[in-house]
Image (cartoon, rainbow, N blue to C red):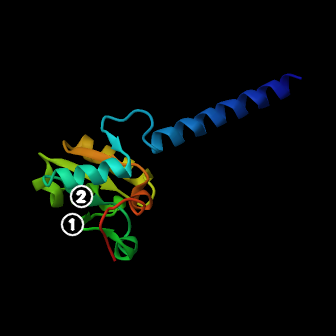
Amino acid sequence: MKKKKITTLLYVVAMAGLLGWFAYAKGWILTNFPSLSPQEAVALMQKDDNITLLDVRTIDEFKAGHLQGATLIPLDRLKANLDKLASAKEKPVLVYCRSGMRSVAAARILEANGFKPINIKGGIIGLKETKAQIIK
């Protein structure tokens, strides 16, 4: 019976760890930056022209459709290319990806380097459902 209790405990710990990782990756916990719904992000873009748009998807994803005026820096290249965003250091940076997980990781990098990131929940998938101008 002791072996079954240990196995159950390990299972519970593993599931809790997985849930914690998922919540962290989605930006639900331990974030120092805001996350906006696609509708809130579109409203902010229409209201404030002092925003930098950052797309952290791949080049092929960007070519398939992106927000007008967005700068592409794939997530895996972001740390090495922060200098491309130097002019945006004092203004909000709206960050998006496909579904919202890579943009959370990018926002964490930006925040750690002195930027003011704002994550767009749901990414380009959510933005397509709004009135956002997506260029193909």
Q: Which residue is mark 2?
A: 53
Q: Secondary structure at mark 2?
A: strand
Residue 58, given in percent of the width and then of the height, sits at 38, 68
Q: Which residue is mark 1?
A: 69
* Image vertical order of residue 5 relative to residue 47, above or below: above
* Amino acid type, callout 2: Leu
* Residue at 46%, 44% in the rendered image: 26
- Quadrant where the C terminus lies? bottom left
In the foreground, 47 or 54: 47
- Classify 10 Å Cα crowding around label 2: few (below 14), some (14-19), many (20 and above): many
Residue at the top extreme of this rendering: 2
Residue 3, given in percent of the width and then of the height, sits at 84, 27
> Which of marks 1 and 2 precedes in the sequence?
2
Residue 27, given in percent of the width and then of the height, sits at 42, 41
Residue 109, given in percent of the width and then of the height, sits at 30, 47
Q: Do tag 2 and tag 1 residues touch (Cβ < 8 Å)?
A: yes
